[in-house]
Structure formats: C-alpha cells, structure tokens
Amino acid sequence: MHAEPPPVEAFRQLERFVSAAALSDRLDAFAALARWAGRGSVAGDSEAAGRAGPGLVALIELLESDPGLLRRYRSAFAALLAETDGTNVFAHAGIPSERGTFAELSERLMNHVLPRPRDDRDLATLLRRLFRSPEAVERFAALPSATFRRLVAVHAGGGGEAVWAGLRRSFADGFRLLATWTASQGLTPKLRKRSRPAAVTESPFYRIGTISEALATQWTANGVRADTVESWRQECDRCRAEMSGIHTRVEREGVSLHVVHGLEMLERCLVRMEAMVDLMAAKEEAEAADVLHRLLATLAVSVQADRSVRHLLWWSTHVLQRRIVERSGRTGEHYVANTRAEYRHMWMAAAGGGLLTVATAALKTQISASAASDFVLGVLYGLNYAVSFLLMQRFGLVLATKQPAMTAAALASIVRDRSGQERADEITEYAARIVRSQLAAVAGNVLVVALGAVGFVHLWSLVRSTPFLSQAEAAAVYAALSPVNSGTVFYAALTGVILWLASVAGGWFDNFCAYHRLPHALAEHPAGRRLGSERMARWGEALSNNAAGWATNISLGFMLGMTPAIGHFLGVPLDVRHVTLNSGVLGIATASLGTGWFGDGMFVRGVVGVVVMFVLNLSVSFLLALVTAARAYQLPASGVAMLLRTLYRRFVTAPRDFLVPPRDRPAQESPEADRS
C-alpha cells in the first residue's frame, strides 16, 4: 500500500478544521493541521521548499489554488481568533512570575506530575500545543521569508479589519502589562537601593510606562508616530543602562536570587516590548511579516521555557554561579606556583600540611575505635577534620586536591576572555602551573605524612610500650584502602564531589556575607562598646578576607566526617577516601605492624589505593569545577572540549612543563628590562 500524496492528506486536515463547530474541536483540528504541515512527508522540489517543509508548502499551495476552500479556512480561523484571547501570549509567555524562583519551581514540578486543565480561550495554550519540542520551534524559525509571507497572506487576506480587532487589542493589552511590570519591578526597594540615587519620576522604569501607554493607544488607533517610537527606544536604552549598573554592583557586592529574578524579569520584558515596538513601527507589509516571524519564533521559545524546570534553575542561578566561581578562583590563587621560588614554597607548605595531617589521621583512628553512635562519630570526625583544615589556612599550609576546585574558575575565565592562539597558549601555560603545583602539594603531603606517621607510631611505642594499632586493626586499614577489597574507587570519586561541593559552599557563604554586608554589621555591632570598636573592626575585616576559606574548610571537614555516619545510618555504603588523610592512616597501620607490614600483598594494594585516591580526588573535583565555571560563563560544550584537547596535546608534547617550573629569568632579561 502506498502513502497518499500530501495534497490529499492536507485536504483531509483542512476539512476537519473548517468543519469544526465547537472551539475545542477547532483548536484540536488546527493543532493537528499544524503538526502535519510541520512534519511533511516527501522531499520538496526546491531548496526553499525543502527547508520550509513539503507539508507546509503543499498546504499553502492547496489554499492558494482553491478560493472556496480558502474562504472557509479564513472563516474558521477568524472564528478561532474571535473566541480566544491572546493577552497572555504577549504578556506572560516566557516572563518570570512575581512569585519568585521557588514558588515557580514548585508549580512547574507539579505541572509535570499533574498537568493543568486546558484553557481553550487562552491562545498561549494553543501556542504550546503547536510547538511541543525545540525541533518544532527550530523548524518554524528556519522558514524562508518568502514562505512565511505567503503564510501570512493566506491568513490575513479577505477577512477585513474586524477579524484582527480582537488580536490587536490583546497585543496592545499585553504591551501595557509588560510596561506595568517593568515599572513596578524596576521601582522595587531591592533594585532602587542598588540604582543611582534619583527621584521616582526620574527613573527610566517609571517614564517608560507613560510612553508605552501612548504607544499602545496610537497602535489601537491604527498608526504610531515616529517620534513616540524613538522616545520609547531612548527610554528603553536608559532602562538597560540602569540595569547594567545594578548588575555590576550586585556582582561586586553579593548576589541574591531575588535581585537576579528582578533583573531577569526586566530584561525579558524589555526584549519582548522591543520586538512588539518593531512590529508597531513597521512601514511595509514585507517588513511587518519578517518582524512578526521573529516575534512568533521568540514566543514559541518562551512557551517551551515556561514548562522547563531545567531552564528555570539555570537562569535563576546563573549569576550566583558566576559569583561563587569567581570568588573560588580568587581564593585559590595562592595554590598556583608561578616561579621556582613559589614552587619551593609550595613544597614547604605541603610538607607542613602533611605534618599536621599526621595528628589528624592519628586522632581519626582513635575516634574510629570508640563505641559512640553514628551521629557522635560523624560530629567528632568532622570537628577533627575542620580544625585541621582551619589550622592549615591560618598558617598558610596546603592540603592536596583542594586546588582543582579553586583553580578551574581561573582556567575557564581564560577561555571566556581570550580567543584563538592566545587563548590556547594561555590555557596550556596556566594548566601546566596548576598540575605541577598540584603534584608538588601531593608529593609534599604524602611524603611527610607517611614519614610523620611512622615516627609518631615509633614514639608511641617507646612511650606506651604497645603498637598504636593492633594487628587486626592495621589489617582492616589495608583492606579498607585496597581498590580490590573495598569500595575505594567509588569512595575516592565521592570525595572528589565533596571537595567540589566544599568550594561551592565557600563561594556561597562569601557571597552571603557580601550581600548582607556582614563584615560591616560586625564592625558596627553594639558589642563594640564593651569589646572595643577597633577589635570589632578587625573581626569584620577578618570575616571579609576569610569567609570563603572558613566556610570551605568547615563544610569540607563536616562533609568528610558525616558522610560515613550518614551512610551507616541509612544502610547505604558511603565512605570517603582523601589521598592525604589516608596516606597518614596507611603509614600508621604500616608502622604498627612492624616487620609484618609487607605480608600477602595488602600493603601494595593499599599504596595502589592511595594512587587511585589521588587521581580520582583530583580529576573529579577539577572536572566538576570546570563544568560549573563553564556554565557560569556560558561556555559552550565545544569550548570545554577544546580546552581538554589543548591540555592533552601540551602534556604529550612537553610533559616536563607539567612537572617542574622553568628557570626564573634574570632581571636584566625580563620584558620590562628589554623595553627599557
């Protein structure tokens, strides 16, 4: 059996639409007709027909060739417009609601579980049915101008002004609502206190409402004045300049989702209104058709975004992500060794971190031997780790694998700010500095923590005349670290996730302090009358300088400590494996066994487990941080792939650059000396 040619199917779809008596039937038939026209069934005769879709071309040709069918189609389409209201299409589709991010998120999640009842009078419902997928939107946006103009002529001709009067009113009312929301949102306290000081009547958000009403009135009277259009566009530019200033101040002083929500609502309202003004101001039919095509494509994208949970989360957190990433990047600058002197300092700082970790690992083994509850064990582990990490921060020591989550932000910013060969060169150089700094930190940590653990156990044996760990306890350590006998591979990857989450928590807390001006509040606290204003000012300055580091270290400590306890409580196999901490535990177990440490290959498996921890701690935390940075800077996937390819090529061609820094250039050979 052969498929029927497109005109026959087009006639059937058209007949169903023009014969529908009730609004619901008419909407169903029109949606089915549009879906068929968008799909098509055979290849077109020309490139334009192929791009437009042969079904749509066949539909247009059928209507153009049959005046009687065209009259019936226009009559049915006029009835559809008369029974529906398009205000929500123009004013609501794609515009964030006033309820805020979390209320909107709850409703979208509920709509996926239990969709809302149909509202046949709302044209937004029809638009959502016409464009059910991003592919449908792309097909419509890619229509050739000539084809879309023919489509407009099919719908617009022969009906008279009365057919479009209702849609024209809906268009004007939607424009008025957008202007009202622009004024009300732009004049909210959260945005006004971040704007330049001015009277309300001088605000562009206030003035654009008055001009918009004049423009809508002229539009409904079938003609807009050029001077009114120009005045509106000038006021729109002033609104954008004001928003740019607010945005800059927000990124500098701290981000709030409420402020981001307000700025996003303003931007979308202005973009929609600009497209509508372009349509109002169009002088020729061809120009008006092209503007209408772009506007409808934008509305189609908007009705798709209105249902997307992912899209809502992305735009709600984009600026906050950027603030967190940039702060994390600045916090991690001291983790990158640029010169040989800094490289030697990195070794010393890592050695100090390893020595401190010996005490942390020893205390951890003692805590694990206690018979406390899961919650108490988790809290004790967390306190142990957090205090250790805070001491490292206080004395400028380094803990391996905390670096990648800090430095991926700077790496991504290079991709954003550079292009071409300059970008590739700077990426590879910065990546080489990251890797050799990381290797120095890991080597310093592991060597010192292993030697320190052996020394600690021997000192313990001399003082207490007993090994620090029994043979059974030491064997259990070996088994726990082995990648073959335990879940070390999964736990090491999970630890990489925790390292990344800690850097996010640090950036978030730093943003929280900046947004709420906590350092200033602390410096001006009334307790200063008793404790001294200078002391309170020092505390405020310390909070400003160390908020990100404190939050990162404390959150990392308690996440590492509480994860095993939470897993045990829930009956889920959860644990953590950090390379430095477990190197200390392995050293303690080895020294406690005395001469029997190399038996049955378990020691080798423990060493392999430590290597696995290093690779997974480093790679997982780095990749997650890089993905976060890429999303914050809106880097495409191709940009991230290019970055990884460049790193691989540099590592293959010049591996030494990733191991040790080049020799420092003498002062007389520096570029400044050359220029002088």
Image: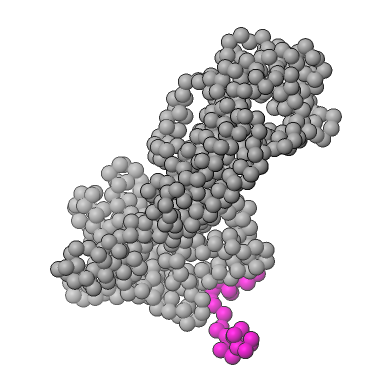
Q: Main secondary structure of the magenta part?
A: helix
Q: Taking 457 as reference, is 631 left or right?
A: right
Position of residue 230 relative to residue 52, above or below, is below
**Image label count:** 0
Name the one closer to the observer, 534 or 160: 160
Along the line of sight, which residue is nearer the eye, 523 or 396? 523
In this view of the protein, can residue 213 be seen by the observer? yes
Tell me which colouring the rendered structure shows. Answer: one colour
Residue drawn at 65 percent across, 63 percent down: 419
> Magenta segment range?
648-676
Q: Residue at x 36, y 74 (%)?
A: 396
Q: Which residue appears at 53% of the width and 30% of the height?
A: 173
x then y, percent, for residue 501: 40, 54
- Provide residue 509's location: percent of width, then percent of height: 35, 57
Image quadrant containing the N terminus:
top right
Residue at the extreme bottom: 668
- At a point 59% along the width and 18% down the height, the residue shown is 82
Q: Is residue 635 above or below residue 362?
A: above
Q: Position of residue 558 (x, y in %)?
A: 30, 56
Q: Name the residue nearer the viewer: 25 or 171.
A: 171
